[in-house]
Image (cartoon, rainbow, N blue to C red):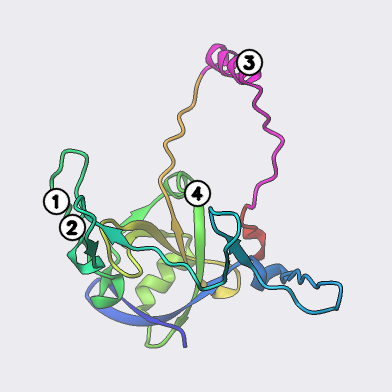
């Protein structure tokens, strides 16, 4: 069942259901199965460091220990920064309404590579004023945290084709533009290091939205 997220625009609250859209929903997916000589399906296993012990899937787990080697539960952990100061935790965005107050331009939006996309389905009436702004091309930025933690992700609310509403989760890019002289130096340095820029990327196709 889709989770419900509540927004607030100019004092008018509304609720939407979020539906994650990933590459498998857009293009389908391929599953690779491996079989042995007897046509029996193989399962993943891990070979231990002794080179003899085989650990089946689900046979390993991770945990936390303190400097004394004692087991520590997750709720005992306290996030700190590099200076050793405690970092205040943020609440999940599902725990309270999210106000839509920050409208941004397209350049600000494009400064954020998008890693997650959610199609929104209205559960309650959305303000006509907000719908008019979105239809005119307005983009609203707001902080979003799915489960809570130590930081928010920058998120954007916008309207796509067919009056569909989208919530896009991104990350601020710190890329800076340089001049031709600097670009030539970077290219020469990359060649010295043997770097190859021909690798394929797994970018999200926004033409499908």
Judge by depth and name the residue closer to the eye, 114 or 54. 54
Gap between marks 2 and 3, in whole Å?
43 Å
Compared with 188, 20 (above or below) is below
Circle 4 sits on which residue? 113
Gap between marks 2 and 1, in whole Å?
7 Å
Q: Residue at x 16, y 56 (%)?
A: 88
Q: Are marks 2 and 1 in contact (CB under 8 Å)?
A: yes
Q: Position of residue 41 (x, y in %)?
A: 76, 77
Circle 2 sits on which residue? 78
How many C-alpha atoms fall within 10 Å of the one at disc 1: few (<14), some, or many (≥20)?
Answer: few
Circle 3 sits on which residue? 192
**2 or 1: mark nearer the eye:** 2
What kind of element bears circle 3?
helix
Circle 1 sits on which residue? 86
**1 or 4: mark nearer the eye:** 1
How many C-alpha atoms fall within 10 Å of the one at disc 4: few (<14), some, or many (≥20)?
Answer: some
Q: Earlier in the sequence, mark 1 or mark 4?
A: 1
Q: Position of residue 4 (x, y in %)?
A: 38, 82
Part of the protein shown in magenta = 179-202
Q: Residue at x 35, y 69 (%)?
A: 146
């Amino acid at each position: 069942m889709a989770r419900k997220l509540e927004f607030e625009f100019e004092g008018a609250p509304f609720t939407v259901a979020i539906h994650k859209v990933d590459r498998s929903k857009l293009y389908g997916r391929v599953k690779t199965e491996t079989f042995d000589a007897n046509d029996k399906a193989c399962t993943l296993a891990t070979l231990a460091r002794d080179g003899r012990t085989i650990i089946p899937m689900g046979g390993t787990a991770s945990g936390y220990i303190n400097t004394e080697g004692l087991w520590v539960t997750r709720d005992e952990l306290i996030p700190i920064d590099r200076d050793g100061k405690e970092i205040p935790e943020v609440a999940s965005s599902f725990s309270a309404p999210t106000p839509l107050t920050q409208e941004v331009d397209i350049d600000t939006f494009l400064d954020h590579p998008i890693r997650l996309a959610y199609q929104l389905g209205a559960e309650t009436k959305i303000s006509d004023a907000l719908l008019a702004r979105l239809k005119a091309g307005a983009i609203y930025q707001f902080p979003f945290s799915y489960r809570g933690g130590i930081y928010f992700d920058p998120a954007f609310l916008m309207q796509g084709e067919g009056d569909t509403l989208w919530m896009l989760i991104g990350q601020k890019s710190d890329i800076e533009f340089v001049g031709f002289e600097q670009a030539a130096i970077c290219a020469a340095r990359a060649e010295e290091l043997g770097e190859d820029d021909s690798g394929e990327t797994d970018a999200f196709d926004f033409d499908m939205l």
